[in-house]
Image (cartoon, rainbow, N blue to C red):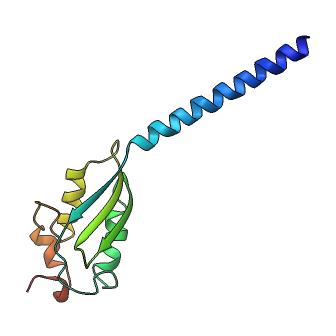
Amino acid sequence: MKTIKKFKLGKIAITLLMFISLSAFAQKNKNIKTAVIKTQIYCDHCKQCETCGDKFNKELYNQTGIKTVEVDPKAMTITVIYDTKKTDLDKIRLYISKLGYDADEVKADPAGVAKLDGCCKKS
């Protein structure tokens, strides 16, 4: 009988542990948000461009809290998945601005624009 009680107790403990870990995982995912940021892209090859194509992936992706970055030059948007515990949307807009691009209502930083290739700048 003691073996049966230990087995049931062990089974209950394992089940309880699973619920606790699933709960922690669910809470962690609550902090992950997706934002679609409007921008102005002036060249038709931004994703492949030597100066700006990798810039979003290297520079923006390396910022604390940013999980993924996807640039859509046709829609003129930048989709960012980020962790709200580590960064916020205002900081992300500022990061994009410093790269030389508008980010919603935040205008491109002139120093960032100066670093862009001529084809990527507003004519």
Q: Residue furthest top?
A: 1
The percent coordinates of residue 74 (x first, y second) are: 25, 79
- With 54 as the anchor, is 100 left or right in this view? left
Is residue 8 placed above or below 45 in the rendered structure?
Answer: above
Which residue is found at the position 33% from the left and 44% from the top? Answer: 84
Image quadrant containing the N terminus: top right
The percent coordinates of residue 107 (x first, y second) are: 10, 65
Is residue 93 placed above or below 108 in the rendered structure?
Answer: above
Q: How many marks?
A: 0
User: Hey, which quadrant is residue 16 in on the image?
Assistant: top right
Image quadrant containing the C terminus: bottom left
Which residue is found at the position 28% from the left and 82% from the top? Answer: 46
- With 103 as the anchor, is 69 left or right in this view? right
User: Hey, which quadrant is residue 62 in on the image?
Assistant: bottom left
Is residue 36 placed above or below 72 in the rendered structure?
Answer: above
Is residue 104 placed above or below 112 in the rendered structure?
Answer: above
Which residue is found at the position 26% from the left and 48% from the top? Answer: 88
Closer to us: 46 or 29 = 29
The percent coordinates of residue 32 (x first, y second) are: 39, 47
Which residue is found at the position 34% from the left and 45% from the top? Answer: 86
- With 119 as the anchor, is 3 left or right in this view? right
The percent coordinates of residue 90 (x first, y second) are: 19, 51
